[in-house]
Image (cartoon, rainbow, N blue to C red):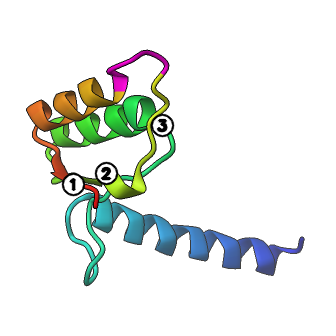
Amino acid sequence: MDGHHIIVWLIIGLIAGSIAGRVVAGGGFGCLGDTIVGLAGDWCVKSTAIDGVRLGYRVTVPLALTRFVGLNPGDAAAAVEQMADAGVMLIASG
């Protein structure tokens, strides 16, 4: 990869990072905002959402787009309760 391509990729990275930072900070574009979805609702999604609220972000978790691992019975319900208690906006599924 020559110097020109590296500069192009750096510029793309700066723009993408700037946009991502704006979205995460609550300055979304149109319908984009601080929405977190994932495949481990009772682990990664929960931790990320709660951390976001603690950092002052407005965080939304659409439960219909989130899957829970559920290693133990009640894990999903406990994760949803912990997110709600932390101030995460939860959008009910269905």
Circle 3 or circle 1, nearest the eye = 1
Q: Which residue is mark 1?
A: 92
Which amino acid is tagged 2?
Leu
Callout 3 crowding tier (Cα within 10 Å): few <14, some 14–19, many ≥20: some
What percent of the width, then of the height, locates residue 5? 79, 78
The residue lying at 45 percent from left, 26 percent from top is 70
Distance from Cα at disc 3 to Cα at disc 2: 11 Å
Q: Which residue is mark 3?
A: 40
What percent of the width, then of the height, locates residue 89? 15, 50
Distance from Cα at disc 3 to Cα at disc 1: 17 Å
Q: Classify mark 3: helix, strand or loop.
A: loop
**What are the residue bounds of the magenta stretch?**
71-75
Q: Is residue 64 left or right of residue 26?
A: right
Which amino acid is tagged 3?
Ala
Check whether the beta carbons of the residues at disc 1 and disc 2 lie within 8 A of each other.
yes
| Quadrant position of residue 33 | bottom left
What percent of the width, then of the height, locates residue 6? 75, 71
Q: Let me know if residue 57 appears in the view.
A: no
Q: Nearer the viewer, residue 46 or 30?
A: 46
